[in-house]
Amino acid sequence: MANARRSAAFIVARWIATKDFPSSMLPQDHDRAFVQDLVYTTIRRIRPLRKILGSLMKQWPKGELEALLYVGAAQILYMPDVPDFAAVSETVDAAKGCENPSIAKVVNGVLRNVIRRREEFEKMIADAPLEERESFPTALVRRWERRFGTENAARLCAWHNTPAETFIARRDGSFVKLERGQRVEDIPGYAEGDFIVQDPGTRLAIELLGPKEGEHILDACAAPGGKTVQIAWRGASVVACEVNPKRRRRLEENLARLKLGVEVIPELPASQTFDKVLVDAPCSNTGVLRRRPDARWNWNGEKLAALVKLQSEILDTCASRVAPGGVLVYSTCSNEPEENEAQVAAFLARHPDFSLEESRESIPFESETDGAFAARLRRQIFQN
């Protein structure tokens, strides 16, 4: 798998340089599962990996060397199914493809030192503070400790460091967990559009929306389309809005595979109202960090504040699209109160014609599904 290690190192190097989504860079060949596991493990554990490698290097490496050392050390310390000899020899083989021939020698020497001093490094990491040990931004761990307590914050970190299972959702509302490494495309019914890939945590929003046959529903932030599909499967007439052109193309591709005649629009209709509106808002993704290991490193207070502002603007815009007596469901894949309960409270203060009927939250260490939040808001019917 030397090529697989090189692919993984290339993705890690590009992610470090550009912060592009690692998922968009994964190969589409037989090595995809291993490369994804290696890349995601490296990104999840990059904080302790950097500490360990920093203790072995006089000068911090850059570019290909940095990425190769990361993926090599990740295999040794965090991927027990990979034998040490394979982690070293095949990562070194991958390094031999670099323009600088000395890189392979450096990789070999450093990785052998990681193995030789493994017990020392494992103790160093075990004794480190939670945010270093489990590899998260310090500010994010502190807020989880304040909200959930130290023990549950540790449980939440451990959850997000566990490779995510893949679930498929079927038309009958059931969810099925796939065997690890099983290709979705190989499952009977894929080409026929019999299922979608979706975590059970997503059902909070759909259950609160309660789509019914004959209802006219707007999915205001629709890509990649999982919730749009769930609405359509329940017989409602759904309009899917997605302003981002790249995400809109992905939405259209997913709907085409599922053979659903859903109208896709690039912007919200100016004056049309709907029986129900779903706002599955852009968010910090802190409920799905095990699926999006890179998202933890994008988190900070400033970005959270910007997302809260964007969510508020989207909600205000969508409020007028709800018919009197209709329902607005707001959802996120976040577990941060500013994006959830506080966002809903602020919306209700600005829009007294809406009232909160129900809200639900999935917290991963309790639900054992992705983290999510959803709230159902009812617009009043005014009497003359």
Image: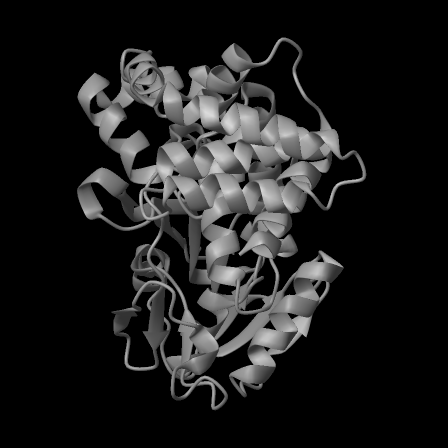
Q: Is residue 81 visible?
A: yes
297, 364: nearer the viewer: 297
Coloring scheme used:
one colour
On the picture, is 253 further left or further right than 330? right
> Between residues 361 and 375, which one lies in front from this camera angle?
361
- Residue 207: x, y in percent? 30, 63
On screen, residue 72 above or below 220: above
- Whether 327 is drawn above or below 311: the answer is below
Q: Quadrant of residue 361?
A: top left
What is the count of numbered marks? 0
Q: Position of residue 262 (x, y in %)?
A: 58, 80
Counting from the top left corner in percent of width and height, residue 121 is at 36, 17
Question: Relative to 188, is 82 above or below?
Answer: above
- The residue at 56%/62% (across/down) is 222
Q: Residue at x 58, y 66 (%)?
A: 273
Q: Quadrant of residue 59?
A: top right
Residue ranking furthest to the right: 99
Quarter holding residue 64 = top right
Residue 329 versus residue 89: which sits nearer the camera?
89
Instruction: Inspect this view and state whether residue 43 appears.
Output: no
Identified at 39% across, 27% down, the residue is 115
Measured from the top left, where is residue 169 in percent x and y?
A: 34, 72
**Residue at the spot x=47%, y=27% of the render?**
112
- Left or right of 52 in this view: 60: right
